[in-house]
Image (spheres, helix red, strand yellow):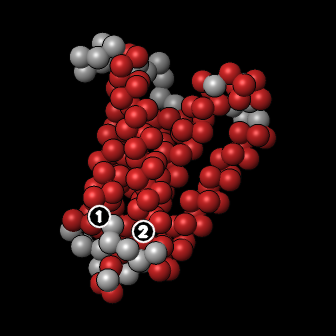
Amino acid sequence: MILGMTLFQFTVLHTALSVIGILTGLLVLQRMVRMRPLGASNNIFLLSTILTSASGFFFPIVRIGPAHIVGVVSLVALAAAAAALWVGNLYGFWRGVYVVSITLALWLNIVVGIIQVFRKFAPLHRLAPNGNEPILLAAQAAAFLFVAGLGWLAFKRFHPGGM
């Protein structure tokens, strides 16, 4: 049992939070690129992604691995994003901190999702059984290019004081 849930129930919750974080994170970046108000999707992204990263530490741990390192890096990025939003109000230096931080947290969430899909979905697992095959690395690279491209556009275009 994890927090009163079976491992399966907890995994479903963790996965749902991750999917919500990814979808709202993409929406937030898209809204920044288009110079739109961030709206509720911004808070939903932050909350769901913080909960996703934190909940990963509740799974049974055999040893500290890459997933734990990714979780720590994501939580540090999300702490910076929260400070930029709630302390710095996204003005000046804080705007850039926010855009870079959420871009990094979103990309990490997507990368973990890609890895999990390759592990759990049999047809993809057959293509990358060891987790280091070129197809898996290509999927991660494509995700990086896509999210980094959106992040770069958001960094260039998003100026909340001008809205």
Dot 2 lies on which element?
A: helix
Please identify the quadrant where the N terminus is shown: top left
Determine the residue positioned at 33% across, 13% down: 6
**Residue 41 location, quadrant:** bottom left
Q: Residue at x 52, y 67 (%)?
A: 151
| Labelled pair 1, 2 in contact (Cβ < 8 Å) | yes
Query: Please, is residue 118 above or below residue 62 in the view?
Result: below
Q: Is residue 6 left or right of residue 119?
A: left
Residue 130 shows in the view: no
Q: Position of residue 39 (x, y in %)?
A: 29, 64
Question: What residue is shown with label 1?
Answer: 39
Front residue of 16 and 3: 16
Query: Quick check: can you spot residue 85?
Result: yes
Q: Amino acid at mark 1?
A: Gly
Residue plotted at (47% across, 66% down): 30
Of marks 1 and 2, which one's residue comes earlier in the chain? 2
Q: Position of residue 134 (x, y in %)?
A: 78, 41
Residue position marked by numbered label 2 in the rendering? 31
From the top left corner, tell me how far across and down residue 152 is, in percent. Answer: 54, 72
Residue 44 falls left or right of residue 146: left
